[in-house]
Each structure stands twice: as structure tokens, then as C-alpha cells.
Image (tube, helix red, strand yellow):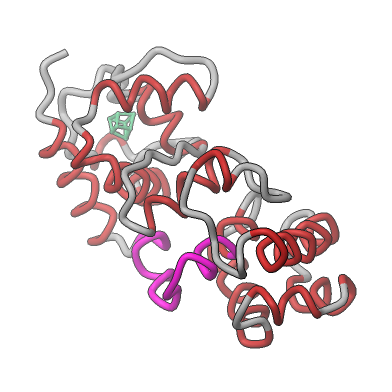
Amino acid sequence: MNVNLEKLLETMENEAKRRNAPVFTLKGFLNDSFQHLIFAVLSSRTKDEITVKAAKKLLSKAKTPEMLAKMSVREIEKLIEGVGFYRVKAKNLKKLAEKLVKEYNSKVPLEFDELIKLPGVGRKTANIVLSASKIPAIAVDTHVHRISNRLGLVKTEKPEETEEELKKLFPKKLWNRVNAAFVGFGQTVCKPVKPLCNECPIKWCPKIGL
Ligand code: SF4
């Protein structure tokens, strides 16, 4: 497939921004890798708007890993209530903070293999944190997986396979733009159900009119 990948990202970014995709409008308050990590852990199976509210509440009380480690699971639960699986996430966040304090000198380790050792942190979260810290990575969530397959960029069953294939396809200098571009485009145009194919600027999409 002969696709100008940079142009594709630009098209998705422009369309998503024009339509105020949450991924581009809601995360401006995140300032460092600790905050990005907390947000990413909270965000799984939760709408961005709800994650933002919970993250703001939690981060206002837990500005550092030490402060989060000192909170009780119940306190954390109260602050993040509303996000999916909040009880499990509260437990994981406390353990995660304790591990950061004890084993990483209260810093977020910026290596994939270390990040995935943290409680509640999987491939996607680890890649989001790396990417937010300007380290090349591609975080594949349901939007990235679905749209990559719809466009025929990959033919994969699992998000891990999609990540692997996208890393072969995109030059490294573009990796950190992939997640936000695809997620924003998936939130606004190429939605899971009833994508807006009539309004889609990607006229070569093999699934147009899906
Ligand atoms: S044409 Fe439809 S399926 Fe293809 S990228 Fe656009 S919205 Fe998605």
C-alpha cells in the first residue's frame, strides 16, 4: 500500500481537532510522567471526561508518588469513584506508588520493561507514558487497532500485533503522533459503530461506506 503516512496523520489530527476530540482538548493539565501514568491507569474502560474529573481530584491530593503511597485505598477509591473498576484501580494505584517510592526513588522509570512491572500497567499504558515523555512508542488501544485494520494498514487480530506492524510501517519520528491522531479520529469520525464515512476525508479507505 502506497500511503503518505505523515499526511495521513496530519489529516486525522486536523479532523479530530476541528471536531474537538477529547484526546486533544482534555489532557492539557497533565504536566509530568507521574501524572500521565496516573491518568493512563485511570483511563482504561472509562470515558475521557470521567477520567479527567477523577484524575484532577486524585492529583490534587496526591501530587507525588510519596503522597499517593501514604493514602489509604479507601481514600483513593472515594476520589476516583466513577471510573471503570475503580476499586481494583485504587488498590493498584496504591501499590504502584509504593513501588515507585521503594524501588525507583519516587521517579517513574522511563523504560518499557520497567514500566510493565508496575501494578496495573500493561503495554498500552507503558507506551502512553513513554510517548508523553518524548520517547518513541506507539500505544495501541481499541481506536488505533480498529482504524489501522479498517484502513488496511495492518491485518491483525490483537492490539499487540497491531503495535508490532505499525512500528514496522511508520518511521520512528512519527510514532509519538500515532496514538493521539488515531484516537482523536476514532472519537469523532471513524467511530466503532456507524463511522461517518460520508464526511471522512480519507477517500481511499477500502471500508468507505462501512
Ligand atoms: S471511510 Fe469510514 S471506515 Fe474508512 S476511515 Fe473514514 S470513517 Fe473510517
Q: Would residue 8 appear left or right of 152 to someone viewing this image?
A: left
The residue at 55%/66% (across/down) is 107
Q: Is residue 37 above or below residue 209?
A: below
Q: Nearer the viewer, residue 153 or 106?
A: 106
Residue 209 is situated, as x and y percent measured from the top left of the image, at 31, 25
In the rendered image, which quarter is residue 37 located in? Answer: bottom right
Residue 174 counted in the magenta span:
no
Residue 33 counted in the magenta span:
yes
Residue 11 is situated, as x and y percent measured from the top left of the image, at 16, 44
The residue at 55%/39% (across/down) is 113
Q: Is residue 179 above or below residue 3?
A: below
Q: Nearer the viewer, residue 25 or 103?
A: 103
Q: Would residue 119 appear left or right of 1 to someone viewing this image?
A: right
Q: Quarter holding the C terminus?
A: top left
Q: Which region of the structure is painted magenta?
A: 21-38
Q: Quarter holding the N terminus?
A: top left
In the rendered image, which quarter is residue 46 located in? Answer: bottom right
Q: Would residue 180 appear left or right of 42 to someone viewing this image?
A: left
